[in-house]
Image (cartoon, rainbow, N blue to C red):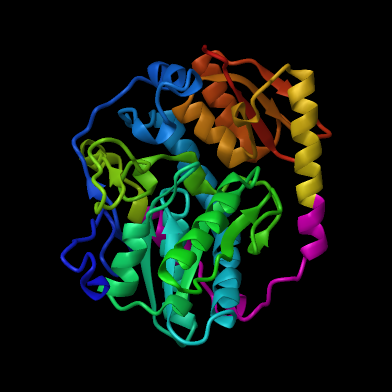
Amino acid sequence: MLNNLHSDKTPLLGSYCAEDCLFLLKNIEPKFYTIEDKERLIQTGAMHYSEMVNQESAPSQQYAELFLNLTEQYKNRLAVEVLQLAKKIVENRDGDICIISLVRAGTPIGVLLNRAINEYGEVNSLHYSISIVRDKGIDENALDYLIYGQKIKPESIVFVDGWTAKGVMTEELKKAVQHYNARRNLNLSEQLFVISDIGGTADFSATFDDYAIPSALMNSTVSGLISRSVLNDQIKADDFHGCISYSHLENCDRSNWFVNQVTDCFKLSDFQTPLQNESLSAKKRQSMTRNFLQEIMQKHHVSNKNRIKPGIAEATRVMLRRVPDLLIVKDKLNPSTIHLLKLAIEKNIDVVEMNEMPFGACALIKDVK
């Protein structure tokens, strides 16, 4: 019975081509919540964050231009980091590779890694993007579809995300994979590969630096026009996790443009340059993150650390998708945080400079209870 599991399911394409990314998600009927209502329902415990999405709108012209400028500024750096991480993936697997990126932050990075491996890795690579939800685990139906439906070898699977922050999703992934392995009597690797490991919790990363990975600036318009994954009452026991397709944003979609911009910077010499082993730095990053969270909780009287989002990428998500209370930046002149300052002005959010913090930025979510 297991061998035929989910063989009839059809992946979603999003706005990427099939060779770049297939989403193992179920398109569901949209029920949109305002950002304010969503925040209140999350904080009062009335609903889990994964049950709700808000309608996304097109970025302002000024913000879109900022994204284009930051892509121009950082695409060469990101290309080098993608190639070095791709080489590390190839070295840690024997034979062909199946990249599983975590929707959505991991999706464009998964596309780039898949291209890099297929071009330079001398092995074949496939890329699927699947859902993982804090407190609820990974989409086991999606894993079943790959392993039993598509006959993907478990030892070929590699989990990819864009970055780490506090390490919540790293911990969720490891716990979820252990649970899945126990249920299915498998030995999937729980290793996580990311570009920027600012929290020091990933197994492999290209950098510990907190900088503006350009794809972190946008929502669906740089992630195949797909929403964050949804896990509500429309999702039945044998379904993939859900999503909304934001087709109304097709005219401002930059998903393929972005990955093409980075791919055009790929060079074989960068793929051949090994990553440095910085395990001591990872431990140091973990310690710095813990200390920073404690300091912020005390200084700003925050009782729930889920309301603290350290790192430029996570701060950007708060400014775009949550109800921000305060933006903290290391340096107001840092080009990587210009977009955050613009969003703070748009939303009338106070900005504090904190030169000694170990991140480029941190956003606090407002207590709306």
Q: Nearer the viewer, residue 149 or 248?
A: 149
Residue 99 painted magenta: no
Q: Residue at x 76, y 70 (%)?
A: 277
Left or right, 67 with reference to 88: left
Q: On the image, which quarter does residue 245 sit in?
A: top left
Point out residue 303 in the picture as x, y percentages from the top left corner: 68, 21
Q: Nearer the viewer, residue 79 or 85?
A: 85
Main SS class of the magenta portion in the image:
helix
Q: Is residue 20 visible?
A: no
Q: On the image, which quarter does residue 7 sit in?
A: bottom left
Point out residue 42 in the picture as x, y percentages from the top left corner: 46, 24
Does residue 303 lie above or below 129 as drawn? above
Does residue 61 lie above or below 207 as drawn? above
Q: How many marks?
A: 0
Q: Which residues are magenta?
A: 257-284
Left or right, 320 with reference to 300: left
Q: Is residue 184 visible?
A: yes
Left or right, 311 with reference to 354: left
Q: Nearer the viewer, residue 368 or 260?
A: 368
Left or right, 63 with reference to 23: right
Does residue 303 lie above or below 292 as drawn? above
Classify the position of the N terminus by image quarter: bottom left
